[in-house]
Image (spheres, grey):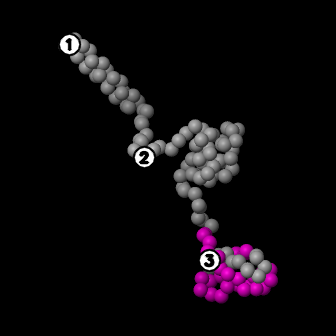
Amino acid sequence: MPLYDFFCPACGEVFEDLCPPHGPDPACPGCGGQVRRLVSVGRGYRADADWIASVTRVVDKDNPAPHVQAFLADPSRAAYRAWMRGEKLRPLEPGEGIRRQDAAYAACETARREALARFAARRLCAA
């Protein structure tokens, strides 16, 4: 049987109970009154995106800065934005890409600069 949340309008108590989906609702444990079933989400639901968990793995947990500790204590979207501001980071704008900074990229960049320098030298000699 699923777990549901209930609200009692008579005494204001909110509680959860196991009951069948189409069966009668239980009585309020506080006053015995009639209750209303609340719309709720399951325990496995997370309001924040899955990527927040991956961000918390890379945050320096030994950093005593308040924005870091606040994000680790409450990994929500608002705390993530505050952490980004505290680290002086910004999200990528639409159209921006991540530049690769590996050895192959560095070798290509060096070759590109050398080719441009040789082209400029030839143009100066020809003129």
Mark 2, residue position? 94
Lower sequence index among marks 1 and 3: 3
**Residue 91 x/y as whole percent:** 51, 44
Above or below: residue 74 compared with residue 66: below
Q: Give the spatial CA distance, label 1 vs label 3.
A: 84 Å
Q: Is residue 77 visible?
A: yes
Residue visible at 76% across and 76% down in the picture = 12
Q: Secondary structure at mark 1?
A: loop
Lower sequence index among marks 2 and 3: 3
Question: Disc 2 residue type?
Answer: Pro
Mark 3, residue position? 2
Q: Is residue 27 magenta?
A: yes
Residue 127: numbered disc: 1
- Disc 3 crowd, CA 10 A, few/some/many (<14, 14-19, 20+): few
Residue visible at 59% across and 61% down in the picture = 46
Front-most of 88 and 23?
Answer: 88
Q: Are marks 1 and 3 in contact (CB under 8 Å)?
A: no
Q: Secondary structure at mark 3?
A: loop
**Residue 112 x/y as whole percent:** 32, 26
Residue visible at 60% across and 82% down in the picture = 21
**Residue 92 x/y as whole percent:** 47, 43
Q: Secondary structure at mark 2?
A: loop
